[in-house]
Amino acid sequence: MNNKRRSVSVFLVLFCALAVGAALLLSSSASAQSSRAWTSAGSTGTVDEDSTAIAQVRNFTVTLQPGTTGSVHVRYNITPVDGISRFCPATTSQVRVRFRNGDNSGATAKTSFDIHSSNITGGGNNIVYSFDSNAKGNGGSFTTFTDSAAPLTFDFSANIYWIEATIFRNNVNQFTDLGSIQIFETAGTACP
């Protein structure tokens, strides 16, 4: 009888420990999800058909092939994650871009993109945010630019969103690469 009570007690202690552990795991998982950003590596975009002859995907980036010039056009579908649409509406969002640009004037090399939206029922093609690397580059090294006051709000119940990026150079000695983009809402009215 004593061994039976001990077995039941051990079972109850283990059960309680597992229940508490599961609750903590779910709690930390839920709080991590509420701050998840939409993120894409440059290499995961869809290169336009008119750019395939000069584009290359190298490591995590999209760039021009060695010895080529021109413009590479790439599209990224923005999908809803908790951090990109956590306010209803958002007053500001944060956009982080990892890129390399050898020409800060944009005359011979530039990385740029626009975030587009289209209403699901009404259509349209609206540019809601634009980025270009002019005066933000770091020469031959990668850099990360952060726009902490981007006036973006995402409503995936009414709209679809995508990015159209352009990686341009007209001098083969210039660097221009798109490494990654990260977007999340930072302030606004909490969703119900």
Image (cartoon, helix red, strand yellow):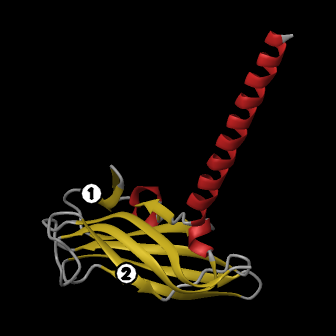
Residue type marked 1:
Gln
Q: Which residue is mark 2?
A: 147
User: What residue is rendered at 65% in x and 41% in y?
Assistant: 21
Image-based side of 14 in relation to 50, left or right: right
Residue where numbered disc 1 is placed: 65
Between 133 and 73, which is closer to the camera in this rendering?
Answer: 133
Residue 155: x %, y % from top left: 66, 80
Q: Quadrant of residue 105?
A: bottom left
In front here: 144 or 10?
Answer: 10
Q: Looking at the image, is mark 1 or mark 2 earlier in the sequence? A: 1
Specify whether 122 is left or right of 116. Answer: right
Say left or right for 184 vs 133: right
Circle number at residue 74: none
Residue 183 point in image, percent of width and height: 48, 72
Residue 88: image quadrant is: bottom right
The amino acid on which the numbered mark 2 sits, given as a three-letter code, is: Asp
The residue depicted at 63 percent of the width and 48 percent of the height is 24
Q: Is residue 188 visible?
A: yes
